[in-house]
């Protein structure tokens, strides 16, 4: 599954509040400055999810300052989707939107079927377990797609 390492990646999901911020944070932590990385949602109607913040903090990834944004806001703020080499959709709705918005661009849109943990688990621990599962699915797909993460002290 490993392909050429992209210079710019956009992760997207439904609200840019759970899966795509986790993916953005993981990518930045694991691969550093090797690629320009952003995330967006089909809609921006939620702030970053507290459980996402908690399970990423376990790995030393800071998400609490993340501000959710939609594809529409990205374009309003001057982020052109054609600047990305790769768009990774983490939900079916975001895949449809990404394909529609980029149909005239020469870039790849990949779909990674990542668990949506938002409705899972009754207790706090059960919810955290579901979010950890989603986070780990993203990490595993990233390693399969982009190769092993950079080593400490490695400049690339």
Image (spheres, rainbow, N blue to C red):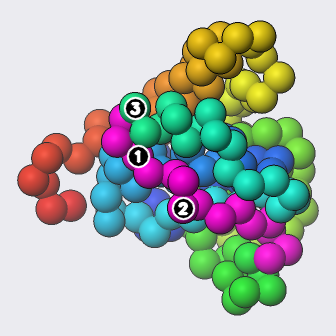
Is 61 or 79 nearer to us in this picture? 61
State yes or no: discs 1 and 3 in contact (Cβ < 8 Å): no
Is 118 or 6 nearer to us in this picture? 118
Residue 56 against residue 125 in the figure, above or below: below
Identify the residue under disc 3: 58
Residue 149 against residue 86 in the figure, above or below: above
Please tell me how crowded label 2 is: few (under 14), some (14-19), or many (20+) other residues with Cα within 10 Å.
few
Return the x and y of residue 37 as percentages of the image width and height.
Answer: 50, 63
State yes or no: discs 1 and 2 in contact (Cβ < 8 Å): no
Label ID, residue 29 = none
Q: In which quadrant will I find the C terminus?
A: bottom left
Disc 3 to disc 2, how far (Cα)?
16 Å
Disc 1 to disc 2, how far (Cα)?
11 Å
Residue 120 against residue 29 in the figure, above or below: above
The residue located at (29%, 42%) in the rendering is 149
Please tell me how crowded label 1 is: few (under 14), some (14-19), or many (20+) other residues with Cα within 10 Å.
some
Within the magenta stretch, is there residue 72? Answer: yes
Identify the residue under disc 1: 61
Segment tinted magenta in the rendering: 59-73
The residue located at (15%, 62%) in the rendering is 155
Identify the residue under disc 2: 65
Disc 1 to disc 3, how far (Cα)?
7 Å
For the image shown, how many numbered marks are present on the structure?
A: 3
Please tell me how crowded label 3 is: few (under 14), some (14-19), or many (20+) other residues with Cα within 10 Å.
few
Within the magenta stretch, is there residue 114? Answer: no
Is 25 or 129 nearer to us in this picture? 129
Side of 148 relative to 16 (left or right)? left
Secondary structure under tag 3 reads: loop
Secondary structure under tag 1 reads: loop
């Amino acid at each position: 599954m490993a392909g050429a390492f992209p210079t710019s990646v956009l992760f997207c999901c439904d609200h840019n509040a759970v899966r795509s911020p986790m993916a953005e944070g993981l990518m930045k932590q694991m691969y550093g400055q090797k690629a320009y990385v952003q995330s967006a949602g089909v809609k921006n109607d939620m702030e970053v999810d507290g459980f996402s913040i908690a399970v990423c903090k376990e790995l030393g990834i800071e998400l609490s300052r993340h501000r959710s944004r939609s594809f529409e806001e990205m374009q309003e703020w001057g982020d052109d989707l054609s600047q990305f080499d790769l768009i990774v959709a983490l939900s079916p709705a975001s895949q449809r939107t990404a394909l529609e918005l980029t149909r005239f661009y020469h870039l790849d849109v990949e779909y990674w079927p990542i668990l949506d943990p938002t409705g899972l688990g009754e207790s706090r621990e059960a919810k955290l377990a579901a979010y950890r599962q989603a986070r780990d699915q993203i990490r595993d797909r990233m390693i399969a797609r982009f190769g092993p993460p950079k080593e400490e002290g490695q400049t690339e």
